[in-house]
Image (cartoon, helix red, strand yellow):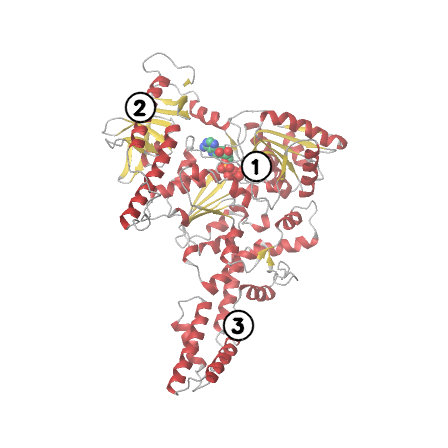
Amino acid sequence: MSEAGTPRRRALDPYEEERQHLERVQDVIRQALASGPRMPVRDEDDEDADEALTADVVADVAVAEMAEQRRHQLRRAMREPYFGRIDFQPEGESPLKLYIGKQGLDHPSTGERVVLDWRAPAASVFYSFNGQGDEARYEAPGGEVRGTVSLKRNIVVRDGDLVRVVDSYVKGQTQAGAVDEFLLYRLADAKDSRLHDIVATIQAEQNEVIRADKNVPILIQGVAGSGKTTVALHRLAYLLYQDPDKLRADRMVIFAPSAMFVDYISEVLPELGVGDVQQTTFAAFALRVLDYVVLLGDPAKRLRERFALRPSPAYEQLRREIELKGRVETVDALEAFLRDIEKDMVPACDVPSPVGPPIPAETVRRWFHTEYARYPVRQRRDRVLARVKRQWEMQAKQAGKADRATKRQMQTLAREYERAWPDLEPLPIYEAFLARHPGLSLASIQRPAKYGARPLVEPEDLPLLLVIHRWLHGVDARDVFQHVVIDEAQDFSPAHIRVLQAYCPSLSFTILGDLSQSIHSEAGFRDWEEVRALFPECRYVEMSVSYRSTHEIVTFANRILEPFHPKVLATPVFRSGDPVIVEPVAWEHRFERLVERLSEENHRATTIAVLTRTEEDAHVYHQMCLESGLDAHLLTAAQTQYEGGISVVPVYLAKGLEFDSVIVVDADASHYGANERDAKLLYVGCTRALHRLRLYYCDRPSPLIAWAVAN
Ligand SMILES: Nc1ncnc2c1ncn2[C@@H]1O[C@H](COP(=O)(O)OP(=O)(O)OP(=O)(O)O)[C@@H](O)[C@H]1O
């Protein structure tokens, strides 16, 4: 390994070798920048300019725009053309030095490959090669390629300068744990308020998930910090690269748990050179598809009820309903209910005509159930009504009656006949279903008294409303996805996933979650088997290494969870850091102590979280921070952005995020009891920390912590 500032003099010194190579590659980039078409320049004074915009000019502009995009990529590549090198000799061929970067680069005049895109088949060796022996292989379009590796090298280039060279494998040398050194160096960095790409350090197990076959749904149980979100985003970039002719970024979607989380992950895909992938929440998607005929009730209120220290009996009843609404059996029951409505939908009476014989109900039934059977229900009804009107008009024409009175009569009759059909709006149909289904009630639906205000529903109502919407209107072609990623999937019920399948008929899904973090247990699935059962064929993978937190933090967090028998406990990457501190504090000094701590942390960390058990406590601690002159942000359920710096957050809203330093306040017995829900909450809180974790308690520590410390 060589580092910046310590170049060695020998000819084959890795640092010097790479410095010279970097210069050569940067020369190639300069040449590429100098070549290629440029944007046609428009003469502002040319009055005929608009007319001159012929098809040729339009085509030229399109080519030039693409060239401009390419130049933008090249300028980016100039700053960091690659991050790794692998020397690989395919069987029976000459050895190759493969430089791997975020994007590929070919020599503009010779066409020679100078940098390999990280998603290219051969680049896979860089990620899958683990230094156990020198053999390696990768899947290429023409079949498997086998060969041997003689060097694996990590290279850090920042702003065009070579900063660091780390060899993690050199054939014939003892590797003495060097494989992880570069990863550890990267993990030790302080983080800002955004998630970033990990192309330089993707691990073998992650590489497998990223490159998994898009046609087989993949379900991933990954412990906290195993890189699920990051891997999902890299997978999208990979799939787009692999199949550019068939896949479109704007037809791919990632469902994230909150608007704030969408903001938090928003930079990864652009960093990977991918734009336009939809990043949204299930609720935002559902409300848009439903055309906002309903809105969501206050999410903060619901969370307050759900995470109250002592849940009320009313919430216990609600919990049972939430769980029931999330079952596939309930979706089945709703579909059966809709089929019943459909069966008897056509009014039993013949359709009277103002000018001729009535149209028999049997004829209308045939139109509806047979001739228009391929259309969704609402369209079928509308087609029937339009056909009835056409028939009347024909009868009127034959009878020579085109007078206004006949027309008015037709309008009146048409209105009356339409009223004889059932109401085809999603909410009334849903209410009728809730009223009939055992165990369900109308409690989650509010109809505000204010004139014009839209009805409010709760998140668990949305999948079922989508079922009704689909029955009424079908699926709009614009809502059909080519690939769906569900992140934090443990908060998705089987009903959510089942409903989403209709919007991705290819069943190309990547579903990632962690049952140890299922703090919304009544709303999500309980076992991966429930998800597997929804797919005729799928692949299930476990990711058990936690990359986010230090060894000390992962070990501590595992002990909190252990008594509740989680299926998979996290294995820490061996990155040692500060010990986890559990500190008693007198009730009257708790604010003072926290401010002292935050002031100290502020010098060392970019992002710090104060995690409270409830939202009310978050308000109190936040206010106290402000009064002490600390610039702290309060994160609430309504938040759409995460600013970094000091954040005061109710623990249940911190899921998915990460911070250099985490301080859990009120970690006492009254805030975190010896039960599974509180253990998961505390586990989620502790696993948000990258480098430092501290817990304060007054009076008695939570039994969960007492176990963790004792063990
Ligand atoms: N191979 C890797 N190289 C470098 N950093 C990594 C790698 N894998 C994961 N990380 C880092 O680990 C942290 C956790 O990643 P991520 O948030 O994607 O994990 P997660 O499994 O979604 O976590 P959680 O379930 O706790 O929200 C991030 O900072 C990410 O950059």
Query: Is label 3 or label 2 in front?
Result: 2
In what element is the residue under mark 1? loop
Residue tagged 3:
422
Label 2 packing within 10 angstroms: few (<14), some (14-19), many (20+): few
Judge whether 287 appears above or below 106 on screen. below
Residue tagged 2:
24
The amino acid marked with disc number 2 is Arg
The amino acid marked with disc number 3 is Pro
Are the residues tagged 3 and 2 within 8 Å (C-beta)? no
Is the residue indicated by label 3 positioned so its CB lies within 8 Å of ligand 1? no
In what element is the residue under mark 3? loop
Query: Is label 1 or label 3 in front?
Result: 1
Residue nearer the viewer, 297 or 571: 297
Label 1 packing within 10 angstroms: few (<14), some (14-19), many (20+): some
Judge whether 518 appears above or below 179 on screen. below
Q: In this view, does 265 lie to the left or right of 70?
A: right
- First in residue order: circle 3 vs circle 2: 2
| Residue 226 place in picture, x, y as percent | 49, 36
Residue tagged 1:
643
| Residue 96 place in picture, x, y as percent | 28, 27
Q: In this view, does 328 lie to the left or right of 56?
A: right
Residue 232: name its quadrant: top left
Number of numbered discs visible in the structure rendering:
3
In what element is the residue under mark 2? helix
The amino acid marked with disc number 1 is Glu
| Residue 236 place in picture, x, y as percent | 41, 43
Judge whether 295 appears above or below 303 on screen. below
Q: Is residue 708 left or right of residue 205?
A: right
Q: Is residue 195 left or right of residue 693?
A: left
Q: Does residue 223 show up?
A: no
Which of the labelled discs sits on residue 239, or is there none?
Answer: none
> Marks 2 and 1, how far apart in space?
40 Å
